[in-house]
Amino acid sequence: KIETGQEREHISKNPEFRGGLNFHGAMKSFWLGHYERCRYHCEQGITSSDVKQIKSVMMTFYNGISCFHSGKKYKSNRKLQSTVRNAIKVMRERREESPWNYGNKLNLLEAESYSFNGGRDEMAIIS
């Protein structure tokens, strides 16, 4: 569908609408395997002040988990590593609210982090 000028203007002036598009774009990109695009949408959506809090938390998780799909780039890129650390921090803070949801997301992020940082032995001790 081709957007009209009026529709584009509405999207650019409405942060909540833009945040919703970024949220859905992030989810779609992640599940289609477009991890760089997923991170792009997450970073755009998180800065939008009108995005609901739960969407922001979920985008933080998907932004963090997408970093691991960057392969070797993850090990040398401080921004990606910082993104993962932030996602782990947010999931730790949220774990008390919903242990089965945020706790499992935290376990997944930590396991990926240990795996990428060569800490497979430490992860076996934790589980």
Image: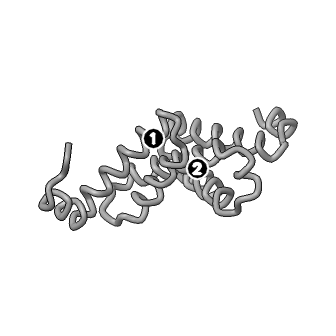
- Indicate the position of residue 50 as horizontal and vertical percent values: 30, 62
In front: 124, or 61?
A: 61
**Residue for badge 1:** 29
Q: Quadrant of residue 5?
A: bottom left
> How packed is label 2: few (under 14 Cα within 10 Å), some, or many (20 or more)?
many
Residue 64 disc label: 2
* Above or below, 100 relative to 63: above
Q: Where residue 18 sits in the image (x, y, percent)? A: 29, 57
Give the amino acid type for the residue marked by disc 2 in the picture: Gly
**Image quadrant in which the N terminus is located:** top left
Residue under the image location 82 percent in, 32 percent down: 124
Q: Earlier in the sequence, mark 1 or mark 2?
A: 1
Q: In the image, what residue occupies the spot 24% across and 56% down? A: 17
**Quarter-wise, where is residue 127 in the image?**
top right
Q: Residue at x 76, y 57 (%)?
A: 76
Q: In the displayed structure, does residue 111 sit left or right of residue 46?
A: right
